[in-house]
């Protein structure tokens, strides 16, 4: 896009294209250097220069249509550059939002026709700039100007100037200021400029920012207590103070734009409301549609369906939608005794113990006596009891005399020491932390465990579109807060779909009764925004300020003040890790090494029966 101005100039009437001005018998006279054409050219050069410009014409009187054409021809002669593109066809065929506009009309009816066509084709830009040129032979244009400005206000066209030619051969500019220190929602025309002798006699900005200061005019805000997003506190003067994630944002916007907040209460049942496919609405949306509130705030999710009916700001918070379930069940007394080791470790201990018992029984009843004495010792009358008591840290009263038997005993004592110390340490930590049973952390685990998820009507579409939730959710009109209290009270195999910030805030407030568990798996990231009436002055100004708050980190700070976890993030108590075979690998390696040493000694002791020197060596070691 180069710097050339694009003029889309279209004639929307049924007049023939031949020039008949000479046959008008003097009813309309066009003089070169007319103030109206000079004023338009001045605005184009001073304000619209180097921008895309859309020029539209509409005339009820076809003779005034020719006058509009001649005015534009004179404007083209006044500007010092050539248009890049000139379209004489129906300009409504050119789609796209039109930021800079010049509209030439001859009456209020022509303006209404033009505005209606622009509205139904969705090409006008409410935050754009409009110069409306009113060309007619009426002496008093003030009533027409009033009606045009009322329509502009209805459609939130605030950057508007109406250009009319006065009796003194000057071009006058009229606009309206909806918010002043003397009035609110005012659409009365005000003379702001006069173009005389190719000069603006008033040095005022042609398109000032009219909503930067609302002069304490009230804006109607519909919301309700929805922690941690919106919290309210009644003041002694009858006003309401808002706080919370978005309540602080509301207060800061009111301070920045200098407006007072007029609180409009939402319906008690289903305050958020619905928008149905046929266009009907309930709750807050219906109140907004009737024009009884200017905007609403309070954890509103952006959706295309809502954006069709209401204007919206940018998303300023990304809130995860998660599933929350009750905290875990406590272990029974028997489960606590077996908790420190995993099933594989307990199985290994059981196999070793059974193997030891079988060896003892085999040696005692099925093997020769000298083999029993060689392995277990001659004075060991209760080997099974000694094995158990030594495993528990007791004393062996009659240690064996043979080296092999002593190595077997030492191996068993080391293994028992490692297992006993590990068991006691894990059990102590388990009791200290009051560990609960592991909870599901994914939708798949919820489905396998047989959970049912509570979903309120506004979030039904989220549950329906999620494959994991589709078959386990149920719709309920019970409030989220009431259901969370029931979950905290011990409601089992149930969960709730709601914003994570809501559950985090709930856990912070009700931590004494046990925090709720938040699944790590996110169902959706919800973009929060503010909804306005379909046509509103405040969308773009609010977006500008919200963007500044976001870039400065204020939004995150306000959010953390209410939703930063103070006690636990996910609502589950920390679990003590069970010892597994992998963690006991060192003990097992030592155990294997001792078995090898014991085997070597066993072989040497067998050889000592054949070699006198070896037998003397082992007797010296035993002594």
Image (spheres, rainbow, N blue to C red):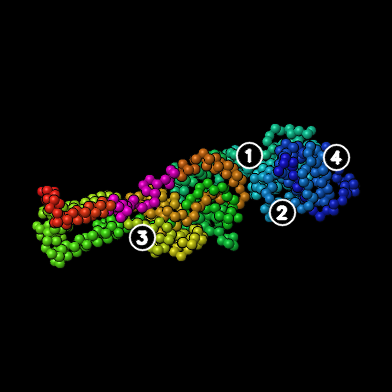
Assess whether residue 578 is covered by the magenta stretch.
yes
Q: Which residues are magenta?
A: 560-588
Which residue sits at x=48%, y=43%?
556
Where disc 3 sits, the SS reads: loop
Contact flag, marks 3 and 4 (Cβ < 8 Å): no
Q: Which disc is residue 491 wearing?
A: 3
Pinpoint residue 106: horizontal percent, then vertical percent.
Answer: 78, 48
Contact flag, marks 1 and 3 (Cβ < 8 Å): no
Label 3 to label 2: alpha-carbon separation: 58 Å
Disc with the residue nearer the chain's start (3 vs 2):
2
Q: Give the left or right position of residue 53, taking residue 240 as reference.
A: right
Pinpoint residue 324: horizontal percent, then vertical percent.
Answer: 41, 56
Pinpoint residue 607: horizontal percent, then vertical percent.
Answer: 17, 56
| Residue nearest the observer in this picture, 300 or 167 | 300
Disc with the residue nearer the chain's start (3 vs 4):
4
Where disc 2 sits, the SS reads: helix
In the rendered image, which residue does mark 1 sit on?
209
**Comparing labels 3 and 2, the label whose residue is closer to the camera:** 3
Q: How would you rate the neighbour count of disc 1 (Cα within 10 Å): few for under 14, some for 14-19, many for 20 or more?
A: few
Assess whether residue 334 is covered by the magenta stretch.
no
Q: Which disc is residue 117 wearing?
A: 2
Q: How would you rate the neighbour count of disc 3 (Cα within 10 Å): few for under 14, some for 14-19, many for 20 or more?
A: some
Q: With respect to residue 551, does 492 lie above or below? A: below
Q: With respect to residue 288, does 207 lie above or below? A: above
Q: Quadrant of residue 352?
A: bottom left
Residue 366 visible in this rendered orientation of the protein: yes
Check the picture and name the quadrant holding the N terminus: top right
Where disc 1 sits, the SS reads: loop
In the rendered image, which residue does mark 4 sit on?
31
Q: Quadrant of residue 322?
A: bottom left
**Comparing labels 4 and 2, the label whose residue is closer to the camera:** 2
Where disc 4 sits, the SS reads: loop
């Amino acid at each position: 896009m180069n710097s050339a101005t694009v003029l889309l100039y279209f004639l929307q009437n049924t007049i023939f294209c031949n020039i008949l001005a000479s046959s008008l018998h003097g009813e309309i006279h066009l003089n070169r250097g007319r103030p109206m054409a000079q004023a338009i050219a001045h605005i184009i050069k001073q304000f619209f220069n180097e921008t895309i410009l859309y020029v539209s014409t509409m005339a009820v009187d076809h003779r005034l249509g020719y006058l509009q054409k001649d005015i534009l021809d004179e404007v083209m002669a006044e500007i010092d550059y050539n248009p890049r593109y000139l379209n004489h066809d129906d300009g409504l065929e050119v789609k796209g939002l039109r930021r800079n506009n010049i509209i030439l009309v001859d009456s209020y009816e022509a303006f209404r026709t033009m505005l209606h066509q622009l509205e139904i084709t969705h090409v006008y830009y409410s935050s754009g700039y409009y110069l409306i040129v009113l060309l007619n032979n009426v002496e008093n244009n003030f009533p027409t100007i009033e009606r045009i400005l009322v329509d502009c206000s209805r459609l939130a066209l605030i950057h508007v100037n109406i250009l009319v030619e006065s009796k003194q051969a000057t071009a006058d500019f009229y606009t309206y200021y909806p918010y002043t220190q003397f009035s609110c929602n005012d659409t009365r025309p005000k003379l702001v400029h006069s173009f005389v002798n190719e000069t603006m006699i008033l040095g005022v900005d042609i398109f000032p920012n009219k909503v930067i200061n609302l002069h304490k005019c009230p804006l109607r805000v519909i919301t309700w207590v929805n922690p941690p997003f919106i919290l309210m506190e009644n003041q002694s003067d009858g006003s309401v103070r808002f706080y919370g994630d978005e309540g602080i944002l509301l207060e800061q916007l009111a301070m920045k734009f200098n407006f007072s907040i007029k609180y409009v209460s939402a319906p008690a049942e289903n305050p958020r409301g619905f928008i149905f496919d046929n266009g009907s609405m309930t709750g807050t949306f219906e109140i907004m549609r009737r024009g009884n509130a200017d905007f609403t705030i309070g954890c509103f999710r952006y959706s295309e369906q809502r954006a069709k009916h209401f204007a919206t700001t940018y998303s300023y918070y990304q809130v995860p939608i998660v599933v929350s379930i009750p905290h875990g069940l406590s272990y029974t007394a028997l489960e606590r005794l077996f908790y420190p080791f995993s099933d594989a470790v307990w199985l290994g201990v059981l196999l070793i113990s059974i193997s030891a018992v079988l060896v003892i029984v085999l040696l005692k009843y099925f093997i020769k006596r000298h083999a029993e004495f060689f392995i277990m010792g001659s004075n060991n009358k209760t080997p099974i009891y000694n094995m158990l008591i030594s495993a528990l840290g007791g004393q062996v009263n009659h240690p064996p005399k043979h080296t092999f038997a002593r190595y077997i005993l030492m191996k068993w004592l080391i293994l028992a020491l490692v297992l006993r110390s590990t068991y006691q340490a894990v059990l102590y930590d388990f009791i200290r932390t009051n560990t609960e049973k592991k909870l599901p952390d994914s939708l798949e685990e919820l489905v396998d465990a047989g959970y049912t998820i509570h979903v309120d009507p506004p979030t039904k579409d989220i549950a329906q579109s999620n494959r994991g939730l589709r078959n386990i959710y149920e719709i309920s009109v019970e409030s989220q807060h009431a259901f969370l209290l029931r979950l905290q009270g011990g409601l089992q195999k149930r969960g709730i779909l709601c914003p994570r910030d809501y559950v985090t805030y709930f856990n912070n407030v009700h931590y004494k009764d046990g925090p709720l568990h938040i699944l790590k798996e996110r169902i959706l990231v919800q973009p929060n925004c503010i909804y306005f009436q379909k046509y509103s002055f405040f969308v773009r100004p609010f977006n500008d300020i919200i963007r500044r708050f976001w870039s400065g980190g204020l939004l995150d700070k306000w959010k953390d003040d209410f939703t930063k976890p103070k006690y636990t993030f996910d609502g589950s108590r920390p679990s003590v890790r069970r010892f597994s075979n992998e963690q006991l690998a060192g003990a097992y390696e030592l155990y294997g090494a001792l078995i090898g040493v014991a085997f070597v000694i066993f072989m040497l002791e067998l050889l000592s029966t054949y070699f006198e020197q070896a037998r003397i060596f082992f007797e010296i070691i035993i002594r």
